[in-house]
Image (spheres, rainbow, N blue to C red):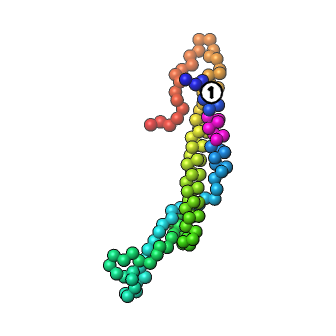
Amino acid sequence: MATTEERVQELERKRAELKARLAEVGDMRPGSLVERYRRCGKVNCHCAGEGAEGHGPSWSLTREVGGKTVTRVVPANAVPEVREQIGEYRRFRGLTRELVEASEQLCDARLAAERDAIPPEDGEKRGSRRRLGRKS
């Protein structure tokens, strides 16, 4: 079992690693890329036939801005780049989530280390050790 100080050092290393990985994140954008096919409405067009796929694909990037859904058309030649940017955004979100969790654990471990470093007064009870965290 690791000591409190070893746990603090381990969490500091993890936090430093996550910060370094965050620095490597490239261009990013939130949203979803959607492939769409549409029917033009002309009676004699190939898209009007039953089971026809329609015209397309056309690509749309959809995301929420200020509580409203915003959609932008993405040119077909930009689709691979936009996919990569969306992937980088998802990676960024995952790394920040991990960084917050590691930082919270580090703060808790430092509090425990400080508590353990203070010797109890003669005859004073230290009380039970409760794990800091969320209640179920």
Is residue 40 toward the left or the right of residue 113 in the image? left
The part of the image, by quadrant, that contains residue 39 is bottom left
Across and down, in percent, residue 99 comes to 60, 43
Which residue in the rendered view is the most extreme toward the top?
Answer: 123
Disc 1 element: helix
Q: Is residue 26 above or below residue 118?
A: below
In the picture of the structure, the residue carrying the numbered disc 1 is 6
Q: Main secondary structure of the magenta part?
A: helix
Q: Residues within 10 Å of mark 1 (few under 14, many from 20)?
A: few
Magenta region, residue range? 11-17
Please name the residue shown 41% across and 77% down the image: 54
Counting the numbered discs, the total is 1
Q: Position of residue 78 (x, y in %)?
A: 58, 69
Q: Nearer the viewer, residue 14 or 5?
A: 14
On whether residue 12 falls in the magenta region, the answer is yes
Q: Quadrant of the C terminus?
A: top left
The amino acid type, in three-letter code, at marker 1 is Glu
Residue 59 percent location from the top left of the image: 51, 70
